[in-house]
Amino acid sequence: MTYETERTESGSPGPVESPARPELIPQDERDTLALRLQQSLGGFVDAPRHAVEEAAAVFEEAADGIAAALTERRHSLRANWIAEKDGRTVEADTEQLRAALQAYRDVTERLLHI
């Protein structure tokens, strides 16, 4: 498990345990997309154009899902170290900044290996 920070009720960052590697696309969706891709590959001989159209649709759905997950993750990461309370920025302490830096490192390294 890795530890990240989350805002407490007071608006200040606090530690929260999170999964070590949250999935960008949930397993059931990945399975469905993989099945559709395999079906499109298997249908190429009988309907080449339809097979390519289906493969393109699967790619688009996967890319859209990843983009949405990354947008959500970006907001989550930012909220871990930047917050406002009563219109003022609440400063994170060194430990919270360290946790935020590790979280950014982890997700960025994953992106660089795609």
Image: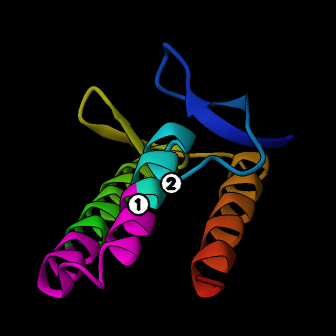
Name the spot of residue 8 as percent of width and height, x first: 55, 20
What secondary structure is marked by label 1?
A: helix
Residue found 23% across the figure and 79% down from its top: 46
Name the spot of residue 99 as percent of width and height, x first: 74, 52
* In the displayed structure image, the side of residue 58 where residue 103 appears, left or right: right
* Magenta segment includes 45: yes
Region in magenta = 36-56
- Looking at numbered disc 2 in the image, what kind of residue is underneath it? Leu
Residue denoted by label 2: 24
What secondary structure predominates along the stretch shown in magenta?
helix
Q: Nearer the viewer, residue 7 or 32?
A: 32
* In the displayed structure image, the side of residue 98 where residue 107 appears, left or right: left
- Looking at numbered disc 1 in the image, what kind of residue is underneath it? Leu
Q: Which mark is residue 15?
A: none
Residue denoted by label 1: 70
| Mark 2 or mark 1, earlier in chain | 2
Closer to viewer: mark 2 or mark 1:
2
Could you classify mark 1 by the number of other residues whose Cα lies within 10 Å: few (under 14), some (14-19), or many (20 or more)? some
Name the spot of residue 24 as percent of width and height, x first: 50, 54
Find out whether the residues at labels 2 and 1 contact each other: C-beta distance under 8 Å.
yes
